Amino acid sequence: MIKGLAISTVWVLDQDRAKEFYTEKLGLELRTDMTMGEGGMRWLTVGAPDQPGIDLTLMVPGPPAMDPESAEMMKKLIAKGVLGAGVLRTDDIHGDYKKLKDRGVEFLQEPQERPYGTEALFRDDSGNWFSFTQHREGELDLEKDWSC
Amino acid sequence: MPAFSCAVRAFSRAGSLSVPRATIGNVDRMRQLRLAKDVIDRDWAEPGTDLDTLAARAGYSRYHFIRAFKAAYGETPGQYLTHRRIDRAEDLLRTANLSVTEICHLVGFSSLGTFSARFKTWTGMTPSEYRAKHVGRGAALIPGCYAMLWAGGFRTGPGAGARDGTGAGERNSGEAP
């Protein structure tokens, strides 16, 4: 039986820069940063301090796991900004929006009311977009004619 | 560490290959174009969002910027900006208690005539007709992020013909840079 999500991959363009972005700008904690043998794979994971069971692994597309052509296509898609990496949750969207923005995180959308909560959008330093959402307590709010 | 043994296996399967150096530049250029597109997504209502600003953000000359942007995203920067503004105008017409003129200015157009003409080119209806058709419609439940990225994406399906088949040249003139 599947018990839950443990690790999810976020493809990035540079692990050093991604490590700095995810820990210093987003405030996630570093879980692992180790290299498997001489010149081997660098296993880099981060996660939210309040959620120890879920890691994001920050990986650069490339050989030997991916052929050079595929890796190059992936990198272009990441840089082009078409890939979304997920939804991150907060309990203080307006405060955290300001905090992250002041740290230099590039937002595409300031917090806006949605039926399921209040949502902002930002990009990581590679180009992946994340939804940043404070969940609405209780039921979906369907009273308004929501614009999306 | 059993948790990632599969990933380790994937990474240790083949010998080391290197990505050709010449291709790295493409990723950087794509990133520059994306930064300019992000400016449109964020500041579409700012009257100062013009072609010079966007080209400078991308580090391109105006001429090469327009071509490179279209090659990457399928529309010129001007078309993309118009498309963003019209999408937002559609939202406001459906949901906000504002006049067509107010909405026209809110989404970054200075002339009501140009706004109405562009709106009709994109949607097939004048702003007033659009509002009359959508009044009282129910809530949309698609998360805003997906809707926004969907709206920013490439036109496909039945809507594409209606929007892209009419006056593609016109859309790139007037209000848009």
Image (cartoon, coloured by chain):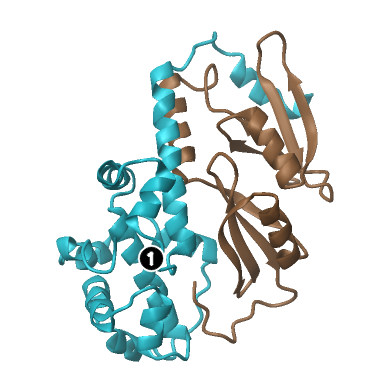
Chain colours: A brown, B cyan
Q: Is residue B158 left or right of residue B34?
A: left
* Secondary structure at numbered mark 1: helix
Is residue B101 depicted above or below A19 in this figure?
Answer: below
Across the whole image, how many numbered discs are drawn on residues? 1
- Mark 1 belongs to chain: B
* Image side of residue B10 versus residue B40, left or right: right
Q: Residue at x 33, y 65 (%)?
A: B83
* Residue B155 seen by the camera: no
The N terminus of chain B lies in which quarter of the figure? top right
Q: Is residue A53 visible?
A: yes
Residue B86: which quarter of the image? bottom left
Please, what is the three-letter code of the amino acid marked with disc 1? Arg
Residue B108, quarter of picture? bottom left
The residue at 64%/71% (across/down) is: A116
The structure residue drawn at horizontal position 33% and vertical position 88%, both measured from the top left corner, is: B133
Q: Name the residue at 36% across, 88% down.
A: B100
Residue B41 pos. (x, y %): 45, 59
Report whether B157 appears left or right of B108: left
Position of residue B34 measured from the top left corner of the image (x, y, whole percent): 44, 46
Q: Is residue A67 left or right of residue A52?
A: left
Residue B51 x/y as whole percent: 33, 55
Which residue has dot 1 on it? B84
Q: Callout 1: few (<14), some (14-19), or many (20+) C-alpha neighbours within 10 Å?
A: many
Q: Looking at the rendering, in which quadrant would you find the C terminus of chain B? A: bottom left
Residue B148 in percent (x, y) is at: 47, 62
